[in-house]
Amino acid sequence: MKKKSILFISFMVIMIVMGASDSLRGVFSLVFEQHFALSTFEVSLIVTISYIGNLVFLFFGGSFVDRYNKKKVFLTVLLLWMCGALLFVLTDNFYLLLFGMFLCMGTSTLINTTINILVPVVFAASPGLIVNVLFFVQGIGTSTSQNVAGRFATGFSVWKWVNTILLLLAVLGMILLCHSEIPDVKKEEKEKVSLKSILNQPAFIFLIVIFGFYFIAEHGILNWLVLYGTKELKLSTKGAAGYLSVFFGGITVGRLIFAPVVQKLGPKNSILVFGNIGMVFYALGIVLGGRAIALLSISGLSISIVYPTLLLLIQNYFKKDRAATATGVIISVATIFDIVFNMVFGSLTDKIGLKYSFYILPVSIIGFSIIYFLFTRTVKETANE
């Protein structure tokens, strides 16, 4: 088997693990709440710590990917994720759970971002197609774990067993990665990337706000839909997890069936078309409430291509030797939106209830669409060198 094929398989295995791992916070939120006797604010702290991990790992990690051997950096980050998963398996302590969330979420997002940076280098002929296929595979991990765990998330022991399975799969992905090759661009090893050159790009602030609003919209559903469905819509945990599973199932399927469309339309136009359609269904599903929540689930199909395609789009505005650094800085700063949202959301929910605090989500996706439209009209792509 060619080493490029081994690399692709290792990426798929790792993406499945990362997708499943990232989805478990929302599915097990009720289990955490009951097991540790937490308030809604304390549940939100679990999510907040996760996104602080995002900020830290992406801010510093992108620079490491640009400056050092990509394969060694990738393996190191994957090993750190495994350390976090071990904490979940071996401990039963709220503070160690928080630290594990910091490690796993931070490294998971850095791994996803690094794969997006590597795809155009390894699979130069069709990066848009490959990226969306890989995120389709990740979606399988997300949707499957939500569906299965949602049915059996009856106690903390299930949490441990699920993480044990993911840890074993991560070991398989690491073994495959060790037997593959990841190319490096020589000048990336020697040159220190200028952060100032990234900050001065006109696209920088726009992309931070675009990612920030999108993060609130997608991650808000991932982390809070089960709690919202059970407490406000009076659904069973199984039913609420089912709607969540359909949402991410749509994201999964959409990334596969729309990948050729993205390749044809290009990143900028693809996000404009699919993002706006998804925004309408998403906002209506939450604002109308009740059975209309099905519209929210359906919206996942349309917004499926937004995140991986946004990651590809970044590379159209920054030179190759600083693409990973730029991506890391943009996403890490955008993660502040996630951190602030979860802190405010948890506190606000304790005061006014989930029903009204949940309206932050449709406002966020509408904000995403408006800012992205302005971005496409005012900022020109930079020739990549």
Image (cartoon, rainbow, N blue to C red):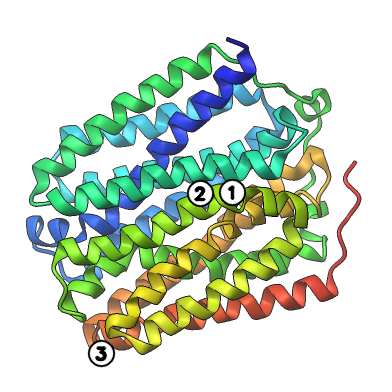
Q: Which mark is residue 352?
A: 3
Residue sitting at x 35%, y 50%: 143
SS at badge 1: helix
Question: What element does badge 2 sit on?
Answer: helix
Cβ–Cβ under 8 Å for marks 2 and 1: yes
Decide if residue 60 is in sight here.
Answer: no
The residue carrying mark 1 is 59
Kindly report which numbered mark, 2 or 3, lies closer to the viewer in this rendering. Answer: 3
Whether residue 11 is visible to the viewer of this picture, yes or no, is yes
Closer to the eye: label 3 or 1: 3
For residue 307, above or below residue 384: below
Crowd rating for badge 3 (residues with CA inside 10 Å; few <14, some 14–19, many 20+): few
Kind of residue at disc 3? Ile
Residue 21's disc number:
none
What is the C-alpha distance between the residues marked 3 and 1? 34 Å
Work out how far the residue at label 2 is from the one at label 3, CA to CA, in angstroms: 32 Å
Name which residue lies at 81% across and 55% down. Answer: 317
From the viewer's perspective, is 6 left or right of 24?
right
Tell me the quadrant of the picture where the C terminus can be found. top right
Name the residue carrying label 2: 56
Mark earlier in primary sequence (2, 3):
2
Say if 115 sits above or below 95 in the image: above
Q: x, y percentage for residue 190?
A: 80, 26
Q: Residue at x 34, y 82 (%)?
A: 292
